[in-house]
Amino acid sequence: MFVDRHDAGMRLAERLRGLVGAESPVVLGLPRGGVPVAFEVARALGAPMDVIVVRKLGVPFHPELGFGAIGEGGARVVNHGIARRAHLTPANMTMVEEEERAELLRRVRRFRGDRAPVDPAGRMAIVVDDGIATGGTARAACQVARARGAARVVLAVPVGPPDTIEAMREVADEVVCLETPGQFYAISACYSHFPQLADEQVVELLRRAREEGTTESDPSGSAEEVQVDAGQVRLPGRFVVPANAEGVVAFVHGSGSSRHSPRNRYVASVLNGAGLATLLFDLLTPEEETDRANVFDIESLARRLIQVTAWLGDQPGSAGLPIGYFGASTGAAAALWAAAEPGSGVAAIVSRGGRPDLAGPRLSAVRAATLLVVGGRDQVVLDLNKAAQERLRCENLLQIVPGATHLFEEPGALETVAALARDWFTRHLT
């Protein structure tokens, strides 16, 4: 259902945009696995992000049965019905709470250090995890967020069993869940890549959230769903223009992909943060995609890209801006072919796991500065890129991402691609 937690976070953020509206949310990630998901949500919504550390208060002789939960700032929630049925005395409850309070404070110091927590009082608190199974921790987190003064509590998760999701509506004002499979086995089974996270990774994401400035406004600028006029067809796209944009990048996806590609959308968000406008669009219509030959008709794809580039030049947000192409797979070949046209005006190209060899007849005519990014374990494509690079006469560079395969699914691989693309485009477009 999801490539990884970053993919899940970006898709969850899209669902949340309409819900949040004009409200001023705070995004609270459950450590550890919920934090990468929350990071993407906070970045997309332009909201401050923090962890929400909670500890369940378990019945001493049956720890899995919780009689309450505690959180920061003295937040305390007790289910007196369970406490009575378990015949708990005040002394029993105090003993459990003291033990859990010590562990809570240890984890808070580990994740946040001496920084003050983000205060959800009077605001919408979006509690985020990477999925829920029984829902015990998520339930406690929602209760603690409300106890800390949140005006509205939204639980947002990528996946969970239908009955558990429905039960969460008892503790949250709104529950947003992307997938509710009838046959639910484990959260990890819903992800292609689901590594265990270390405390250090949580700390690093919190640091990045602060440095990237998850402020009260949307850092990506204005985002608009558009219909791109490309000659005889109109193509759906997503056009994002940050304030004071200094360049624009058109994303040219490859075989079997679309404007919804989580990898390209992640890279686009990084470029937006660097002050670059982006256009993600469907290169082919649904009818055209049914014929696989269209996917490899590089010349036709390049002609269409030229029409899309002309459309960009007429838009108020991108008219007059330097233009770049970000191509993946066969899309990279189309980008190079289009850039080789006389007077194309394209200043820079980045190819991610691309097939520049398919633009072979046009490679020597490309004048745009070209960066080829290939995974170190993608040997066949790496060899094709090396051969294509020898035919380029423009400024060019081949960057190998160690340990990465064709889709850059490995931890940190896509982040490396995004950083390389950001640096290349800001150097040549701004």
Image (cartoon, rainbow, N blue to C red):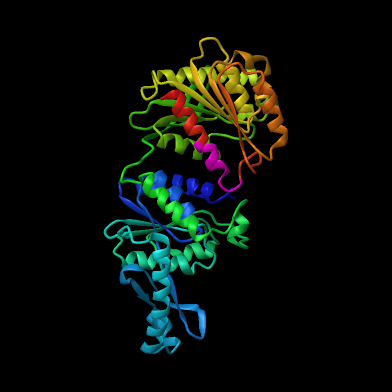
Residue 237 seen: no
Residue at 36%, 40% (x, y): give it. 219
The image shows residue 107 at horizontal and vertical percentages of 43, 67
Residue 133 found in image quarter? bottom right
The correct choice, above or below, for 304 with respect to 418 in the image is above
Q: Nearer the viewer, residue 120 or 163?
A: 120
Compared to residue 185, the image places residue 344 above or below, namely above
Total labels drawn:
0
Q: 279 left or right of 288? A: left
Residue 138 appears in the rendering:
yes
Q: Up-down: is 138 above or below 236?
A: below
Q: Residue at x 51, y 10 (%)?
A: 343
Q: Considering the image in quadrants, where does the C terminus appear?
A: top left
Q: Which residues are magenta?
A: 410-419
Give how far across and how far down residue 273 sits, in percent: 40, 37
Camera-side residue of 295 and 72: 72
Instruction: Note whether 95 is above or below 336 in the view shown.
Output: below
Q: Residue at x 30, y 50 (%)?
A: 24
Q: Nearer the viewer, residue 295 or 99?
A: 99
- Characterize the magenta stretch by its predominant secondary structure: helix
Residue 411 inside the magenta-drawn segment: yes
Where does the image place residue 428, in percent across and percent down from the top left? 46, 24
In the image, residue 166 lies in the stretch drawn in magenta:
no
Name the residue furthest left: 122
Q: Is residue 170 left or right of residue 122?
A: right
Counting from the top left corner in percent of width and height, residue 56 is at 44, 73
Q: Would you identify the image quadrant in which residue 378 lies?
A: top right
